[in-house]
Amino acid sequence: MKLFRAAFGILAIILAAALTVKAESAETAAELIEQAHKHDNMYTLGPEAGQQKALSLYESALASEPDDKQRLHILYRMAQLCGSSYDLSKGEKPDFNRAISIYKQIIDSYPPDEPLVSKAASSLCDHYTTLRDFESAVKWAKKVLEYDTTAITEQINQLEQQKQLLDIDPSERHDRQEADKELLKLREEFRQARALKKNLKAIKRYQLIAVDQVAYSATLIDPLRAHGELRAIAEKYMGTFIAERAAKLLRENMDKMPELWAPPLDLPASDNPSLRASTSAPAAITLTLESIQNNSYIPTELVDRSYPAE
């Protein structure tokens, strides 16, 4: 029995030490992040701002076992610093390939309902375009569109249906203590619904941007490629704000280059016109809009080129 108690005591000491180390590690991560902010030009414009110093501190924070939220913040700031923040006078320069690599870590490590995942993919597309890898830019922009927001929308609706229960007077219930617990639960669910709505709005914003990125990068490859990509998006996401954005850009692109869509003189007119180079721009646009306008969409203001605010 004494031996058992001694072994149990040693185990308890080891466990307590492990928990202490973990707590200290979490504190260290937070402290390193705070120190990095003092050199990160997103948080300071003073003389202490420096890309390499901030990156070094973020790397140390990343190695100190941060929690998931801290890790996401660290990775995102490292990617942004590598891809956009530099001062040539200090010998600093962008490293787009490293930024792309870090953004891919974010995309691979976090669920698609995390808005920073969509934002990371959008930034990744911009870097591929800067590197003139337009095929990769198109590929990753299209990946942003693949996330189906239906589930998160339904979750928001289910949570908000509970809102009316918040108006019930607890005194009218038989068990006041249980009523108070239920109200606390409902308030938490309503808070979750607000957070999810904010996330949903951000994700939709980056999906709109992604359609624009497909159009831009594909046009740099070939205007006809952009036409095909936009048409495919409009058809694949029929009945959504994504399809409406694609149709709008398709019309704008075709208006800019009507000579690409004029029917060739040596070909007969088609009995069944479709969106292709042998179809005139007005006919193609009419077909696109007619095929898409039969479906319901979000309000027009949400697809304005200015994008909804985050």
Image (cartoon, helix red, strand yellow):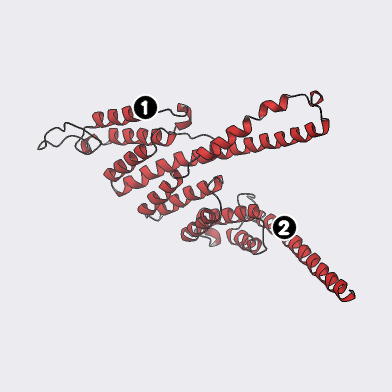
| SS at badge 2 | helix
| SS at badge 1 | helix
The label on residue 257 is: none
Foreground residue, 253 or 95? 253
Question: Can see residue 86?
Answer: no
Residue highlighted by disc 2 = 31
> Can you tell which of label 2 and label 1 is closer to the viewer?
1
- Name the residue rendered at 21%, 34% in the picture: 279
Foreground residue, 253 or 43? 253
Q: Earlier in the sequence, mark 2 or mark 1?
A: 2
- Inspect the image, locate mark 2, and give the three-letter code of the amino acid beneath it: Glu
- Residue 177 at x, y percent in the picture: 82, 33
30 left or right of 260 in image? right
The image quarter containing residue 290 is top left
For the residues labelled 2 and 1, say whether their Cβ atoms are less than 8 Å apart. Answer: no
The label on residue 293 is: 1
Quadrant in which the C terminus is drawn: top right
Question: Can see residue 65?
Answer: yes
- Residue 69 at x, y percent in the picture: 64, 52
238 left or right of 189 in image? left
- Residue 32 at x, y percent in the picture: 69, 59
For label 2, count other residues whose C-alpha is less than 10 Å away and answer few (under 14), some (14-19) or many (20+).
Answer: some
- Inspect the image, locate mark 1, and give the three-letter code of the amino acid beneath it: Gln
Foreground residue, 307 or 108? 108
Quadrant in which the N terminus is drawn: bottom right
